[in-house]
Image: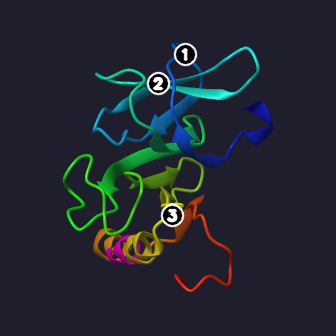
């Protein structure tokens, strides 16, 4: 992680358990609603997360940051479905449960604030990708009322010329 020092990183399809105390923090929620609590490395330097009450179940759309450089002011997760507040809900023609995690961050040196949104769109459902992106854009508008810079990242499961865009 030291080569990414000072950055904010998004991970998708993250599943696993591990314990440790590093200068990294994580914001995210698994598809079943368990909250991620810590981050560590395995012996191959792969990122691993420890999930709260249901260790090991469900993938996450996590946002990771260096606690020395950034402060998380707010964060949340919503499900890419017709019922985004319902934990574990699957939308439209999706094959899998998908979520988006967002965080309002503050750069400790400059005080600048910005939003980060991390997601993983469905790899099968065209309508799920299209409506998932639409939902994310609507939520960004609702969350980011002050017009802070916004970074949207994740696994979009489509090519740049895809009709869903």
Chain-order first, disc 3 or disc 2? 2
Residue 59, quarter of the rendered image: top left
Residue 26, percent from left and from top: 48, 36
Mark 2 and mark 1: span between their CA atoms? 8 Å
Which sits in the foreground, 60 or 81? 81
Q: Residue at x 50, y 33 (%)?
A: 25
Mark 3 and mark 1: span between their CA atoms? 37 Å
Instruction: Give the main secondary structure, helix, strand or loop, of the magenta stretch.
Output: helix
Q: Specify the label residue 38 is tagged with.
A: 2
Residue placed under numbered mark 3 in the picture:
124
Residue 158, percent from left and from top: 62, 70
Q: Residue at x 54, y 66 (%)?
A: 152
Q: Residue at x 54, y 61 (%)?
A: 123
Which sits in the foreground, 160 or 28? 160
Q: Is residue 36 magenta?
A: no
Residue placed under numbered mark 1 in the picture:
21
Q: Is residue 137 magenta?
A: yes
Residue 76, percent from left and from top: 32, 50
Task: State which region is magenta.
Answer: 134-138
* Count of numbered circles on the image: 3
Badge 1 local density, few (<14 within 10 Å), some, or many (20+)? few
In the image, which is nearer the foreground, mark 3 or mark 2? 3
In contact (CB < 8 Å): disc 2 and disc 1: yes
Q: From the viewer's perspective, tell me whether residue 67 is left or right of residue 134.
A: right
Mark 3 and mark 2: span between their CA atoms? 31 Å
Q: From the viewer's perspective, tell me whether residue 84 is left or right of residue 159.
A: left
Residue 99, quarter of the rendered image: bottom left
Q: As displayed, is residue 51 above or below residue 58? A: above
Image quadrant containing the N terminus: top right
Q: From the viewer's perspective, tell me whether residue 155 is left or right of residue 57.
A: right
In the image, which is nearer the foreground, mark 3 or mark 1? 3
| Residue at the right extreme of this rendering | 3
């Amino acid at each position: 992680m030291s080569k990414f020092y000072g950055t904010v990183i998004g991970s998708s399809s993250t599943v696993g358990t591990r314990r440790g105390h590093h200068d990294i923090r994580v914001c995210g929620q698994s598809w079943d609603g368990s909250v991620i609590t810590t981050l560590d490395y395995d012996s191959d330097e792969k990122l691993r997360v420890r999930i709260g009450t249901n260790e090991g179940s469900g993938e996450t759309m996590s946002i990771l940051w260096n606690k020395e450089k950034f402060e998380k002011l707010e964060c949340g997760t919503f499900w890419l479905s017709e019922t985004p507040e319902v934990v574990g809900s699957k939308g439209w023609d999706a094959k899998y449960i998908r979520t988006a995690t967002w965080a309002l961050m503050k750069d400790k040196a400059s005080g600048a604030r910005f939003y980060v949104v991390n997601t993983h769109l469905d790899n099968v459902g065209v309508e799920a990708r299209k409506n998932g992106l639409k939902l994310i854009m609507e939520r960004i508008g609702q969350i980011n009322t002050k017009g802070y810079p916004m970074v949207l990242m994740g696994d979009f499961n489509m090519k740049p010329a895809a009709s869903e865009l």
